[in-house]
Image (cartoon, grey):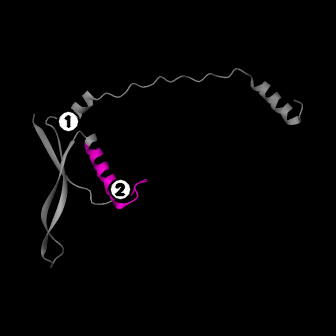
């Protein structure tokens, strides 16, 4: 089977999220958001690679070697999203019941309310 591949930079910024206490939890939440977004587009997570990259810090600084993480995704060639939609069907919608209307009259409830206030009942 032929695949097409997509490589994106792993998230470095930690997003604040309710329930994610420490920095490890926050980076895990960012990673989960990224993986979910790509999966919704039909991409399957394959692996994470760490690659050495030579970067320059400023105008006059020397270049130094840093390591960057990238996420590798794949999907079958020929539009994975359309194929994914065809295989996954949403659950059937539940039937909604219409609420029953009360049959007592408004006048009777007003009479009862006025009698309760006056202490007649």
Question: For this view, does 105 lie left or right of residue 70?
Answer: right
Residue, far left: 2
Q: Residues within 10 Å of mark 2 (few under 14, many from 20)?
A: some
Q: Which mark is residue 80?
A: 1
What residue is drawn where x is 39% and y is 57%?
16
What residue is drawn where x is 18% and y is 61%?
68
Residue, far top: 103
What are the residue bounds of the magenta stretch? 16-38
**In which quadrant of the rendered view does residue 4 lie?**
top left
Mark 1 → mark 2, Cα distance in angstroms: 31 Å
- From this view, report whether residue 81 is shown above or below residue 7: above
- From this view, report whether residue 38 is shown above or below residue 1: below
What percent of the width, then of the height, locates residue 94? Answer: 45, 25
Kindly identify which residue carries mark 2: 25
**In which quadrant of the rendered view does residue 92 lie?**
top left
Asked which secondary structure carries label 1, the reply is: helix
What percent of the width, then of the height, locates residue 73? Answer: 18, 45
What percent of the width, then of the height, locates residue 9? Answer: 21, 55
Residue 69 painted magenta: no
Question: For this view, does 55 lie left or right of residue 94?
Answer: left
């Amino acid at each position: 089977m032929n695949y097409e591949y997509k490589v994106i930079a792993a998230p470095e910024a930690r997003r604040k999220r309710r329930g994610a206490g420490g920095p490890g939890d926050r980076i895990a939440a960012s990673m989960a958001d990224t993986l979910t977004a790509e999966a919704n587009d039909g991409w399957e997570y394959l692996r994470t690679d760490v690659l050495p990259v030579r970067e320059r810090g400023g105008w006059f600084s020397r270049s130094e070697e840093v390591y960057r993480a990238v996420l590798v995704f794949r999907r079958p060639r020929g539009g994975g999203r359309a194929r994914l939609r065809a295989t996954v069907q949403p659950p059937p919608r539940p039937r909604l019941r219409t609420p029953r209307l009360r049959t007592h009259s408004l006048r009777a409830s007003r009479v009862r309310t006025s009698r309760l206030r006056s202490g007649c009942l």
